[in-house]
């Protein structure tokens, strides 16, 4: 027998994807740089399907039916280039090299172009869902050529998560499109996690409820419009008791959030594209602030409110926070989808945002009932310029906004930092504003740098002779 697909790189993600493929009845060739992982996989899970264990790249390539499908699941960056260089010379025109790691989409563009010259389809593929998703059904975001999707799509759709029978996998667009949307997915994930963390912080300080009781609140929220994987696991984490101290685990975990980089990439690229993803940026910065121990130690004790109310806030406050969370979440996702639209335009990918919302409904970390609302928004006859103006979100924001404003005001009054909630509200108010103070900024720029400005009543660029008679001249 020949294998329909091969997986090289058998750490947790690669091993679980290989098992997922085998469990779906596909013959899978498996290979890893160090043989021990290959042996372990086949020893422990060989009975789950048909694995062809291969010691060398040559043996691995020979085990594959043609055109060959090779899924690379190694550490992103230099290891991925090393593996490509190892396998590409062994492949033939028409074969497919699939990179399922968290590659930067610019690396994927470079690799795709180089391999295309050699006749090999390089398919940069976003995979979300962590280890469990890889085994039980991830959300899969393949880029690359249409031709390669025709050969790979059925396999990938087969092992992906399903929602209402629809696979959480679709062809995203050429070259780096898959890794680009995976990057923004992770950015949105950062924003969503930050917003949930702020909601928890507000409730903890505002209501005085302990983590176990707050877990009940999140469970309750998980039954409504906020229903999502992240809300669900928030309740689980809050309910966890530390075995060694008997305290809530969340009170024992060091409050310094770490990051692997995809959130940062999202913001870096957003700055290059000129897209205001303030929710994602604040989430990345909030993690960064939490990790700056020396700054926090130096500043602890600066004057301000204690963050605690003298009077416990009740049910109404809990509902206010829930609504503020939902509104802020709409903003964060709208900004992320805006970045995808901008990236798609910049690189000519023609990414379908509705299809993306569809495949994010299951398998991935941001899976949520909410993604179905986004899918519906893009299914309207005239898709919205921004999700904020989709009728169902206009209504939701209208319902939420009094609560949202009260919560942000309360947080400021109590001295509880809510960068995610407040930047979301500021973005909302900026977009709806009739006039922005950007006019004054243009005046300042013209004053010190003769940068010129446009007028509301006439075409053209203008400059005021600030250091002369202050008359206006056309530029
Ligand atoms: P790791 O990211 O920890 O990578 C370990 C694998 O890379 C091992 O198989 C290792 O082989 C191999 N490798 C390295 Br390191 N350098 C190599 C080289 N020069 N040549 C050949 N192989 C090399 O594994 P992971 O956590 O399973 O993640 C795999 C990919 O999936 C990453 O890109 C990750 O970002 C991405 N991803 C991870 C998650 C997640 O939840 N963990 C989710 C989505 C995507 P060895 O065994 O011989 O050392």
Image (tube, grey):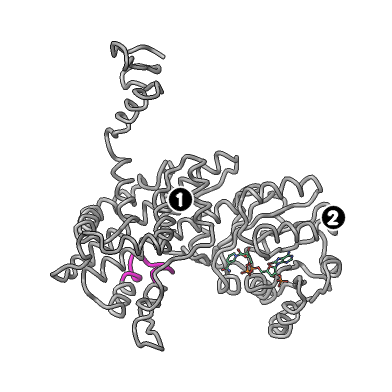
Q: Quarter of the image holding residue 448?
A: top left
Q: Quarter of the image holding residue 326?
A: bottom left
The residue carrying mark 2 is 92
Q: Is residue 59 magenta?
A: no
Q: Is residue 167 visible?
A: no
Q: Position of residue 399 (x, y in %)?
A: 24, 54
Residue 263 lies left or right of residue 21; in this view the side is left
Q: Is residue 307 visible?
A: yes
The quarter of the picture showing ligand 1: bottom right
| Residue at position x 36%, y 54% in the image | 330
Most foreground residue, 255 or 111: 255
Report the span colored magenta: 221-232
Quadrant into which the N terminus falls: bottom right
- Ligand 1 within 8 Å of disc 1? The answer is no
Residue 308 lies left or right of residue 91; in this view the side is left
- Tell me if mark 2 has few (under 14), some (14-19) or many (20+) residues whose alpha carbon lies within 10 angstroms of its own: some
Quadrant into which the C terminus falls: top left
Most foreground residue, 311 or 146: 311
Q: Reading the chain from its start, which is encountered first: label 1 or label 2?
A: 2
- Ligand 1 within 8 Å of disc 2? The answer is no
Q: Position of residue 318 (x, y in %)?
A: 23, 67
Residue 123 lies left or right of residue 218; in this view the side is right
| Residue at position x 45%, y 45% in the image | 338
Q: Position of residue 465 (x, y in %)?
A: 33, 14
Q: Secondary structure at mark 2?
A: loop
The residue carrying mark 1 is 336
Q: Secondary structure at mark 1?
A: helix
Most foreground residue, 441 or 325: 441
């Amino acid at each position: 027998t020949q294998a329909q697909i091969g997986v090289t790189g058998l750490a947790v993600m690669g091993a679980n994807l290989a098992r997922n493929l085998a469990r779906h009845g596909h013959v899978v060739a498996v290979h890893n740089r160090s043989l021990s992982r290959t042996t372990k996989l086949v020893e422990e899970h060989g009975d789950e399907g048909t694995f062809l264990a291969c010691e060398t790249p040559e043996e691995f390539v020979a085990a594959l039916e043609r055109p060959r499908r090779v899924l690379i699941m190694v550490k992103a960056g230099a290891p991925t280039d090393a593996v490509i260089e190892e396998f590409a010379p062994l492949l033939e025109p028409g074969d497919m090299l699939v990179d399922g790691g968290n590659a930067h989409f610019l690396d994927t563009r470079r690799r795709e172009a180089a391999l295309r010259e050699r006749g090999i389809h390089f398919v940069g593929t976003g995979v979300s869902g962590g280890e469990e998703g890889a085994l039980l059904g991830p959300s899969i975001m393949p880029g690359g050529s249409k031709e390669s999707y025709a050969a790979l799509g059925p396999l990938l759709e087969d092992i992906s998560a399903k929602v209402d029978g629809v696979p959480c996998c679709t062809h995203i667009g050429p070259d780096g499109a898959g890794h680009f949307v995976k990057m923004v997915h992770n950015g949105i994930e950062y924003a969503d996690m930050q917003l949930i963390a702020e909601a928890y912080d507000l409730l903890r300080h505002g209501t005085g409820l302990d983590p176990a009781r707050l877990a009940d609140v999140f469970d309750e929220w998980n039954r409504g419009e906020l229903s999502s994987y992240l809300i669900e696991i928030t309740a689980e984490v809050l309910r966890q008791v530390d075995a060694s101290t008997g305290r809530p685990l969340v009170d024992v975990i060091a409050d310094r959030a770490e990051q692997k980089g995809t959130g940062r990439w999202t913001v870096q690229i957003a700055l290059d594209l000129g897209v205001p993803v303030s929710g994602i940026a604040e989430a990345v910065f909030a993690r960064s602030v939490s990790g700056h121990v020396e700054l926090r130690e130096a500043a602890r004790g600066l004057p301000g409110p204690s963050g605690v109310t003298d009077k416990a806030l009740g049910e109404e406050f809990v509902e206010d926070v829930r609504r503020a969370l939902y509104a802020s979440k709409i903003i964060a996702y709208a900004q992320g989808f805006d970045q995808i639209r901008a990236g798609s335009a910049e690189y000519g990918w023609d990414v379908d945002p509705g299809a993306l919302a569809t495949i994010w409904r299951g398998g991935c970390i941001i899976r949520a009932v909410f993604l179905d609302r986004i899918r519906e928004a893009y299914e309207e006859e005239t898709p919205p310029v921004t999700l904020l103006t989709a009728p169902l979100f206009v209504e939701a924001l209208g319902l939420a906004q009094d609560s949202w404003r009260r919560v942000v005001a309360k947080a400021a009054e109590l001295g509880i930092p809510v960068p995610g909630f407040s930047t979301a509200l500021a973005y909302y108010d900026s977009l709806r504003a009739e006039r922005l103070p950007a006019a004054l900024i243009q005046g300042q720029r013209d004053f010190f740098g003769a940068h010129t400005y446009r007028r509301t009543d006439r075409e053209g660029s203008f400059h005021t002779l600030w250091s002369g008679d202050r008359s206006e001249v056309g530029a």
